[in-house]
Structure formats: structure tokens, C-alpha cells
Image (cartoon, rainbow, N blue to C red):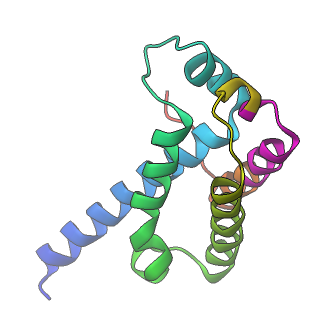
């Protein structure tokens, strides 16, 4: 692999990780969810189901080969724990009303875990 290929891979990896963490940030922010998912106020266009798709689509490569993305073993273990809890929630909870979902006790646990993930990555929301 030449230096240019490494730079592109590194840049792409950072881009994927950043996009993934932006998705986790949305999961961690109940105020955002109430504004965008429940009330449909923009400028963002988003919903719970779109967030689920982004999370698993973007995370697929991260979960398979975390070292390529510069993710430490500790961060990876936390991500896997969060992924499993989020997947279990998605598969077992039938919330058709996003307001009920956002206000459920089970979802609050997901929000708190998402905050832990962001903290482990020292993630700061882009302004």
C-alpha cells in the first residue's frame, strides 16, 4: 500500500467514524428527538427508523474491524455493548408513536448508553 492509499483509507475511516458518532449523538439527545422526530421541526429531517438504519449501516464496518478506524479495544467493547442493547431494543419494542418511544424508560437507558459512547470517544458536536 502506498502512502496515498493509506491517506485515503485513513480519511475515509475518519469520515465514517465521524458520521457514526453524529448518529450516536442524535440518539443521546432527547431534546433533538422531541423536536425533530416527534414534532417534525427542522431544519433536520430524521426519525427513529432512519436513525436505526444509519446506526447499523455506518456501524457495520466499525463493528467488523475496529482497529482500521482507530478505535481502541475499550471503545470497541463499549460500542459492542451499546450496539447489542440498541439492537435488542429495536427488535423487541413496538413503538409506532415516536413520542411514546422517546418518553419510554427503555429508551432513556439507550440515551444514557449513547452518552457513555460519546464520552469514551471525546466526541464534541460540530457547530
Magenta segment: 101-113
Numbered disc total: 0
Q: Is residue 49 above or below residue 100?
A: below
> Measured from the top left, where is residue 73 in percent x and y?
63, 82
User: Does 54 sit left or right of 32 as displayed?
Assistant: left
Q: Where on the picture, by quarter, is residue 119?
A: bottom right
Percent position (x, y) of residue 107?
77, 43
Q: Nearer the viewer, residue 83 or 28?
A: 83
* Magenta span includes 41: no
Residue farthest toward the bottom in the current orientation of the protein: 1
Q: Is residue 106 left or right of residue 43?
A: right
Work out whether residue 92 or residue 37 is closer to the camera in this orientation and state it.
92
Q: Tell me, yes or no, if residue 33 can be seen here.
A: yes
Q: Nearer the viewer, residue 124 or 50?
A: 50
Q: Position of residue 110 (x, y in %)?
A: 75, 50
Q: Is residue 12 above or below residue 115?
A: below
- Main SS, magenta region, reads helix
**Residue 49, above or below 117:** above
Residue in the image at 72% along x and 30% along y: 30
Q: Per the image, is 106 magenta?
A: yes
Residue 124: in sight, yes or no? no
Q: Please identify the quadrant where the N terminus is shown.
A: bottom left
- From the top left corner, tell me how far across and down residue 124 is, in percent: 59, 42
Asked whether 82 or 118 is in front, the reply is 82
Q: Quadrant of residue 121?
A: bottom right
Q: Residue at x 56, y 20 (%)?
A: 36
Which residue is located at x 52 percent, y 49 percent?
52
Amino acid at each position: 500500500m502506498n502512502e496515498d492509499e493509506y491517506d485515503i483509507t485513513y480519511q475515509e475511516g475518519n469520515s465514517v467514524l465521524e458520521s457514526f458518532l453524529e448518529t450516536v449523538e442524535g440518539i443521546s439527545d432527547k431534546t433533538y428527538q422531541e423536536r425533530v422526530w416527534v414534532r417534525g421541526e427542522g431544519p433536520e429531517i430524521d426519525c427513529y427508523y432512519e436513525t436505526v438504519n444509519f446506526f447499523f449501516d455506518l456501524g457495520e464496518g466499525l463493528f467488523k474491524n475496529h482497529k482500521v478506524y482507530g478505535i481502541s479495544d475499550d471503545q470497541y467493547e463499549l460500542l459492542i455493548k451499546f450496539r447489542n442493547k440498541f439492537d435488542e431494543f429495536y427488535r423487541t419494542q413496538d413503538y409506532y408513536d415516536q413520542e411514546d418511544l422517546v418518553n419510554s424508560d427503555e429508551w432513556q437507558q439507550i440515551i444514557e448508553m449513547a452518552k457513555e459512547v460519546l464520552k469514551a470517544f471525546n466526541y464534541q458536536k460540530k457547530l
